[in-house]
Image (cartoon, rainbow, N blue to C red):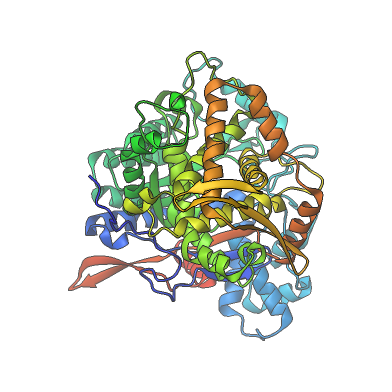
Amino acid sequence: MIIAGAAVAVSACSGNKEGKNFKYLLDEFADLKVMRYQVPGWDGLSLQQKEYIYHLAEAAKWGRDIYWDQNCKYAIPVRKAVESIINDYNGNRKCEEFDQFMVYAKRLFFSNGFHHHYAEDKFFPECPREYFASLMTEVGVENAEELLNAIYNPEFMPQRKATDGDDIVAGSAVNFYEGVTRAEVEAYYASIEVPGDKTPISYGLNTKVVKGEDGVIREEAWKVGGIYGPAIEKIVEELEKAAEVAENDSQKKYIASLCDYYRSGDLRKWDEYNIEWLQDTLGTVDFVNGFVEDYNDPLARKGAWEALVNFKDNEASKRTEILSANAQWFEDNSPVDPRFKKPVVKGVSAKVINVAMLAGDSYPATPIGINLPNADWIRRDYGSKSVTIANITRAYDCAAQESPKSTLTEFAYDEAEIARAKQYAAITDDIHTDLHECLGHGSGQLLPGTSPNALGEYSSTLEETRADLFGLYYMADPKLVELGILPDLEAYKASYDGYIRNGLMVQFNRVELGRPNTEAHMQNRKLIAEWCYEHGQDMHFCDDEGCRWTTAIEKREKDGKTYFVVCDYPALRELFGELLAEIQRIKSEGDYAAGKALVEQYAVNIDPAIHKEVRDRYAALCLKPYGGFVNPTIVPVEKAGKIIDYRLDYSQGYLEQMLEYGRKYSAL
Ligand code: ZN
């Protein structure tokens, strides 16, 4: 049963619990921006759940040095030198060179090393080497020359992960291999892997490959008593404290398996842990902790250490539950031909989470969704856990609004459009995603005899188009207000403005000039926006208020700039419905020719003049392409020697946090 107007908390960026003073954007430098995220729902957790999260978060922070050392064996020594300069340098701090040193320090912390976290190339301080050397001398850094060479020499370890060159293993700065060539590593693994194994362990995931003095290649494990032993012992210690206050036995069991794995280095145990972990769907609190993603390894075997602690977002999950519970109503009322509708439809409740701690490979740059485990055979036999991280997405949106310059202010036509977006877009973006994921993809049915592969190379673009249209059509439905999902009947307009602005302009900043639009989601957005723009000119439209000739979307010019402006929202909704019906027909009948024609006409080719204009306007905004986050501090609240609560403190700054982590969680 649904209570209309239920308080489904969809907070806009301001006016939330932390009040209007919560600032998301903390700092910007080089090509980076640092933000904070809030953790909604914290106060609704029990003391035991908070304690559980607290220890999982401690376990997360204790792994920090592992990730630094994996990136490059000079990363920690360089960081320690930089930390002691920031902490102890007594000379003049008010000069350009010191500022340049500080920018380098901030970049170093951001990338967990001196290679760019995304581009992989070494970056350099802008202050002269002699100046950096003088800072080191002043605070008494040992091995200063060796470290300065690591920092300044462009020939020395130029890339974290090499993708070309003579030998991508020897040419990579990552600390996964020592004294071995790519051919030797490949031969080594070929010799130990079992051909035809249906459930293979993830060979090499948690080891370094070295050549002994005897010339024999071997692996050294990252485990208690092995490489990274002191850090892993701390992780295990905190995980065991966490297990004592876990929510249920299944969590206790998989934490025990994870600790066994950390002690033994046995990858079979890692698989066991993953299977137990992915089957636990009852707990509110969840986490990732281990050697997980292999993107940093040139040979894609070695897991970068990462951790992330999260708990289910009950408000957002309530929203997806409401939508799922009403899935049949949405199916029955869609503008699609009844023959193509599902007689019985089941919505999907996507799990939405909020993170409370990020670490290792997930800190400060972090993903907005997770799908684990990675082992193919476990995914095949047991499935995987897939979640979206609501508070990180929210923080990105809200931080963008705090910038004086944004794609919104640049590409929105007037103040009213900007104000609408600021009031509603954070909410409507989430709801559109929910409609797309929970209902859109699952709606509709194929006619008997239609092959699911009938649309060939156009199928993913058309499928995304269908799911997006389902969401767009229902955004404007009073049903959403009635269900308490949207606050009022105006909100959807922000979503329509944004969709058209993005589909016809903003998104083209990501395509090189002269190139076509090829990515499936970008194609689907362009297809929808272009089709509606074209069909919305001189359109005859009838609704409750009668019939009229109207223009749904207008192209306007102002100060030499182009804008696409939604002029008639009900008419645009009608167009979304019309196109949805057609795309569903194409899918249900497997009409390849019609699908192909739509994609080729509306999705691929970008008007060269618009394309150039978008690229120029976007470049002039000088936006920071990469973002990362500081964590809140989880503070135990004591009374008479007893912990009575854990409080979240958001006041810590970026450098402050980096220095604190360096001071407290330095195990290596
Ligand atoms: Zn989709």
Q: Residue at x 49, y 53 (%)?
A: 429
> Looking at this rendering, what residue extends furthest in the left direction?
640
Spot occupied by residue 72 in the image (x, y as percentages of width and height): 64, 52
The front one of 208 and 650 is 650
Q: Residue at x 55, y 60 (%)?
A: 628
Spot occupied by residue 317 in the image (x, y as percentages of width and height): 34, 48
Q: Is residue 313 above or below residue 401?
A: above
Residue 451 appears in the picture as rendered: yes
Residue 392 appears in the picture as rendered: no
The front one of 576 and 626 is 576
Q: Is residue 406 above or below residue 226?
A: below
How many numbered badges does the structure rendering display? 0
Occupied quadrant, residue 517:
top right
The front one of 82 and 345 is 345
Q: Residue at x 36, y 48 (%)?
A: 479
- Along the horizontal axis of the image, is 668 left or right of 555? left
Spot occupied by residue 92 in the image (x, y as percentages of width and height): 67, 86
Q: Is residue 659 above or below residue 110?
A: below
Q: Residue at x 65, y 73 (%)?
A: 102
Please identify the quadrant where the N terminus is shown. top left
Spot occupied by residue 430 in the image (x, y as percentages of width and height): 45, 52
